[in-house]
Image (spheres, rainbow, N blue to C red):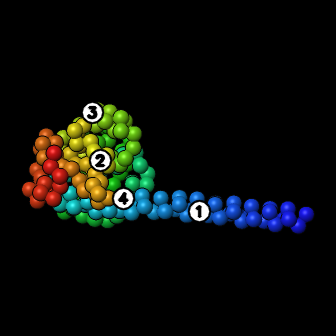
Amino acid sequence: METQSIYNFKLKVLIVMALMMVFVGIGNAFSQAANLYKIQSLFLYNFTKHVKWENTEGAFTIGIYGNPKALAEIKSNLGSKIVWGKNINVIEITSPADISNCQLVYMPRSNKKKIIDFIGNSDLSNTLLVTEDDLTSDGAAISFVFEQSKMKFKISKTKIEEAGLKVSSSLISIGIPV
């Protein structure tokens, strides 16, 4: 009988330890995602300093599609910033029509086909489109990529100019031109 209770105690300890490891792993994953979006928000902010928009009225609007964690982190990091003399307003995008209200649109990693369809149904004039997946061949002007565990970005001067925007040569020189 005593052997059975020792066995049950050990089993409970193992289950508790396993659950703790799972929760620590989940916490680390959330933390890593938040850190990634924090870094990406800094990139987005710096992109705004090196691209020139025409006819920007009101606030400078950044739209985020399909990822509540990215939306919350970017809003937290950029919501109080100013670019080109305008306050930054970070909004959630739910339809292609929402893009026409934004100067910059960020599409974090998600269903790639949905994003490509979304891009195809959007008016990207006067809008800088940034994606987390490499979608520069599918319409994105800038895409975050990882090379040797380092975050970099691919940049398409052609896509930027097709949107009616002007980009500084310094931004192109630090990105990976496509």
Q: Which residue is mark 4?
A: 37
Few, some or many C-alpha atoms within 10 Å of disc 2 (few <14, some 14-19, many ≥20)? many
Q: Quadrant of residue 12?
A: bottom right
Asked if disc 4 and disc 2 are in contact, CB closer than 8 Å, the reply is no
Task: Tell me the distance, in whole angstroms, between the alpha carbons under discs 1 and 4.
Answer: 24 Å
**Which numbered mark, 2 or 3, is in the foreground of this view?**
2
The amino acid pointed to by label 1 is: Met
- Nearer to the camera, 14 or 142: 14
User: Mark 2 or 3 closer to N-term?
Assistant: 3
Q: Which mark is residue 21?
A: 1
Task: Tell me the distance, in whole angstroms, between the alpha carbons under discs 1 and 2.
Answer: 32 Å
User: Mark 3 or 4 closer to N-term?
Assistant: 4
Task: Tell me the distance, in whole angstroms, between the alpha carbons under discs 1 and 3.
Answer: 43 Å
User: Mark 4 or 2 closer to N-term?
Assistant: 4
Check disc 3 and report its element: helix, strand or loop: helix
State the quadrant of the N terminus: bottom right
